[in-house]
Amino acid sequence: MASRSVNKVILLGNLGRDAETKFTASGVACTTFSVATGYRWKDQQTGEWKEDTDWHNVVLWRQENLANYLTKGKQVYVEGRLKTRSYDDKDGKKVYRTEVVADDVLLLGGRGEGVPEEARGPVSMPRNAQRRPSAPAPASAEESPFEPGITDDDVPF
């Protein structure tokens, strides 16, 4: 049996609620939010299209300034790993909770109203400190139909 294992989650969906940031006793920021993803299939018996929505709880550590941009309805790309933790509730019953611990979060979509210029999407908020170098911007905006500064490395797929 191989000694390797993989714990990798990639989500592309919409935020189900505004993100909340709380701080641990030692001052580390913990931002939580939920992401809705959909699945669509054709019923074999009726021929109708059906849809199902799954909700994923996401935890992002050490990104305290992010909650202002992660608002309900925004489309996001999340990359991370699954983590199941347990705790005892107020009645002493053991409760299990599975979450996605995010490594990277990308805000997707067009220019949002009321969002500062520097935060308009797509905006990458990787947890790791090393960034991939971006390609130089075109000489003029007329040469490229794309927004300057956005490269193929910024696209999540």
Image: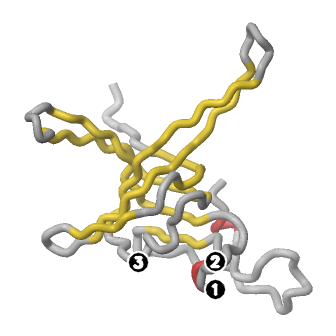
Please name the residue shown 35% across and 30% down the image. 2
In front: 91, or 111?
A: 91
Local secondary structure at mark 3: loop
Residue 65: where, in percent of width, then height? 41, 77
Q: Which mark is residue 13?
A: none
Please name the residue shown 52% across and 65% down the image. 71
Query: Mark 3 or mark 2, which has the lower sequence index?
Result: 3
Task: Determine the CA span between mark 1 and mark 2.
Answer: 6 Å
Local secondary structure at mark 1: helix
Using the rendered view, name the quadrant where residue 106 is placed: bottom right
Q: Which mark is residue 65?
A: 3
In front: 48, or 91?
A: 91
Report which residue position mark 1 lands on.
117
Disc 3 crowd, CA 10 A, few/some/many (<14, 14-19, 20+): few
> Looking at the image, which residue sits at the far front?
91
> Looking at the image, which residue sits at the far bottom?
139
Using the rendered view, name the quadrant where residue 37 is placed: top right
Pointer 1 and pointer 2: residues touching (CB < 8 Å)? yes
Q: Which mark is residue 120?
A: 2
Q: In the figure, 34 relative to 1: above or below?
A: below
Please name the residue shown 50% across and 62% down the image. 105
Task: Determine the CA span between mark 3 and mark 2.
Answer: 14 Å
Please name the residue shown 24% across and 70% down the image. 23
